[in-house]
Structures are given as C-alpha cells and as structure tokens.
C-alpha cells in the first residue's frame, strides 16, 4: 500500500465494487457489514476500530451482528471487529483469518479484491449464524465510510 489518503485509496469504480460486495453479502444474512478507511491513527488499531464501530452506530443493530472491516491506509493497519452476537459464534481466530487474507491482497496491490474477499468471508460467517430474516432491513449503509486524523 502506498501513502495515499483514505479518500484516494480506492477509485470511484473500486468503491462501487466494494459497495456491491457488501450488498451481495448482506442479501443472505441479517448481519450488517461496514468498511471504514482512515488516513492515519495514533492509537492501537483494535482500540480505534472499536471506537469507530461505536461512532458508526454498529452496536445498535437489532441482532447485535454488525461487523466492521477497518483499515488505516497510511499506517497499513487492519482490524475486524464483530458485535456481541456474532462474536459469541465465530471461532476465536476467525477475525485474524479475515485480516490475514486482506493483508495478503493488500501487500500484492489487490485492494478491491482484498476488501471484497474479506467482505465475502464475513458475509458467509454471518449467513451461517444469522440467515436472512423475512422482515430484515438494511440497518447500516453499505457505503465505505472515511475518517482522517
């Protein structure tokens, strides 16, 4: 990854691809997935991702099954945070597996593929434990969110 600002990390077309990956994953689950990119952080990546999770209101979903894929672009730091209900179901190393796949793609310059595969992995796990409900609504935006510090 280069030292791009978060807003420049993905082109408009690439953002659309990630947005579509989130939409496709959420068609099969009541879970919610967000991708958040930031320029730089001073804090521990997990602590900061937890802060962003709360700032985005991800802890307010009906079934407490939201998942945040977080990336600090300049620092090359990645975190995946799941809410209480999904954390109760996934194996302890699952989030690290998602991070590892994402980092492999990013190291090879495959940003969209990495984010899309991470979204797919999270979506499949959400589907296994939280299949789509007949009254499901899209509780959180599928758009990539951005922050800078």
Image (cartoon, rainbow, N blue to C red):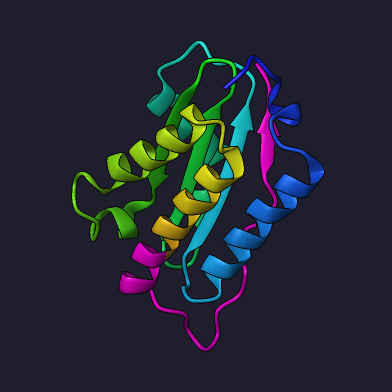
Task: Specify the quadrant that holds the C terminus.
Answer: top right
**Does residue 77 belong to the magenta stretch?**
no
Q: Which residues are magenta?
A: 124-149
Asked where in the image residue 40 lies, by quadrant, the reply is top right
Residue 45: percent from left, percent from top: 43, 23
Residue 45 seen anywhere in this rendered image of the structure: yes
- Residue at 72% across, 47% down: 15
- Relative placement, left or right, of 88 versus 103 is left
Asked where in the image residue 110 lies, by quadrant, the reply is top right
For the stretch drawn in magenta, the main secondary structure is loop
Q: Nearer the viewer, residue 142 or 140?
A: 142
**Does residue 142 belong to the magenta stretch?**
yes
- Residue at 47% across, 83% down: 133
Residue 104: percent from left, percent from top: 41, 34
Q: Nearer the viewer, residue 76 or 149?
A: 76
Residue 47: percent from left, percent from top: 40, 25
Question: Compared to 33, does 43 lie above or below?
Answer: above
């Amino acid at each position: 990854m280069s030292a791009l600002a978060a807003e420049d990390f993905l082109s408009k077309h690439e953002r659309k691809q990630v947005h579509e990956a989130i939409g496709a994953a959420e068609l099969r689950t009541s879970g919610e997935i967000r991708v958040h990119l930031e320029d730089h952080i001073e804090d521990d990546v997990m602590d900061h991702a937890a802060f962003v999770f709360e700032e985005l209101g991800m802890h307010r979903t009906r079934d407490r099954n939201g998942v945040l894929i977080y990336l600090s672009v300049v620092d090359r730091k990645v975190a995946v945070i799941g809410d209480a209900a999904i954390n109760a179901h996934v194996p302890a190393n699952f989030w690290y597996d998602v991070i590892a796949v994402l980092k492999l793609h990013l190291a090879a310059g495959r940003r969209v593929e990495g984010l899309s595969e991470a979204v797919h992995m999270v979506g499949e796990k959400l589907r296994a434990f939280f299949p789509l409900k007949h009254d499901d609504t899209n509780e959180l935006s599928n758009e990539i969110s951005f922050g800078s510090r």
